Amino acid sequence: MRKLMIFVIGVIMVSTIIVSCRTKNSEAIQERAASTNNLCKCYPDFSGIVEKVSPAVVNIFTTQEVQVQSPFPDDIFRFFFGDQFPDSHSRTFKRKSLGSGFIISPDGYIVTNNHVIEKATEIKVILIDGSEYDAKLIGADKNTDVALIKINPDKKLPIVELGDSDKLKIGEWVIAIGNPFGLSYTVTAGIVSGKGRFLNEGPYDNFIQTDAAINPGNSGGPLVNMEGKVVGINTAIIPYAQGIGFAIPINLAKFVIEQLKTKGYVTRGYLGVYIQEITPEIAKNLKLPVNKGVIITRVEKNSPAEKAGLKMDDIIIEFNGKKIEHINDLTVSVSTTPPGSMVTMKIMRGNSIKEVKVKIGELKDRSLEGVEQIKIERMGISVSDVPFEIRAQAGIEGGAMVTSVTPGSVAYLAGIKIGDIIVKVNNEFVKSADHLRKIIDSIPKGRSVDILIYMERGAKYIRIQLR
């Protein structure tokens, strides 16, 4: 009897343990399932945003005329065919390229990148429904890589809503929509990886960094937040990196777009100071009271800064309510302030903080003021003598500086830009702007010439065929 009772008790205990284990296992499974469900809920559904935005995203196809030269010198052909033989071994062909854009008005204004439409002789836009339109360039700004084009639709077009890029937070979800590698209306998602990135692409670099995939063809397309609003223009990639793309903040683009729409060009604010970013090392060496911000190293005469009483060694810590910690914070803030505006700046002078009122001026290309410009119609450019300070910096004695380039001209198609310095033509050094005109005038029509150009980032030889 005793043995029977022990057996029964043992069976009951084992059963209890089994039930307990099953209960705990079931609870663990449920907890894991709940955890998985919660994890899944962390990943948003982008489909609604894509349906809202994609009808206003367009594909842009451009055509450019490109000159290609034969590797054989002109003399070989002229030996057989005489001096009247034109440079027929020089060929012009049409190169196709693609990009993206987005519609900002029902009547057909479209935003894209400048580099998407630069040098284009033909711009075509394809909407999501497959309809195709010829587009006209309204205006472009190389400094920010923003361009505005226009189509004339036969219907009212869907548009995107522009957001506020200043409110973007690092880690926030964003979506890139565009035309990568010609694959129409591709959507990629990621997060904002960084803000205020400087890529040495221009004086107003202030890029949004994202890990949403951006590939060739995405340029000019919108970067969209979770509200379905455009917060950036997809612009740049780093070829040797993965998961790193860059977009122009839409707040910077808004300023440019509005001016391109009304004037066709951009007018920027001007303060008139030379500045240097403060680093901990500079702060230590100069015994500065702060280790962030920008310090004035020079104030230009008769500038808005001088008239407002700003001085060398003043530290700019705030501009019109915005904190200034980096050079780009100030350059972008000043450039996007309309000329004539009165702004308040906070500066640190010594150990005291002062408020200064400044009337912002207009930024002009002062290097061309009072400079005689000579037209070289056969190239499609105007040139001037190179200012002394630029000659000294470049280490040249003469040269001719390009002051304007006619769209569609041989110079334009060859990539010659304003500010380039023409140093040699067919191995002959250019002494001045007038000397360049005489050299070009002496070359027969249809001949190709080799030109050495000093540019902002180096020097190169190009060959163009004179008209």
Image: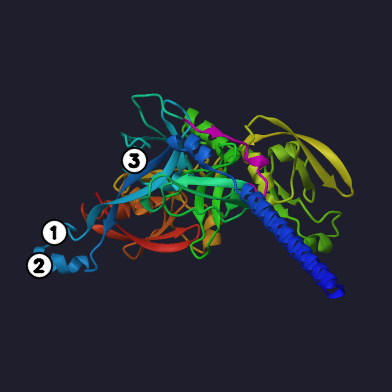
Instruction: Identify the residue at horizontal 38%, vertical 42% (top origin).
Output: 59
Three-letter amino acid code at the position of disc 2: Phe
Q: Residue 27 in magenta?
A: no
Q: Which mark is residue 123?
A: 3
Badge 1 is on which residue?
85
Q: Which mark is residue 80?
A: 2
Query: Which comes before the other along the chain, label 2 or label 3?
Result: 2
Depth check: give the residue in front, 329 or 365: 329
Magenta region, main secondary structure: loop
The structure's colour scheme is rainbow
Which residues lie in the magenta part? 159-172
Three-letter amino acid code at the position of disc 1: Phe
Q: How many marks?
A: 3
Mark 1–mark 2 Cα distance, whole angstroms, equals 9 Å
Mark 1–mark 3 Cα distance, whole angstroms, equals 35 Å
Residue furthest toward the left? Answer: 81
For the N terminus, the image quarter is bottom right
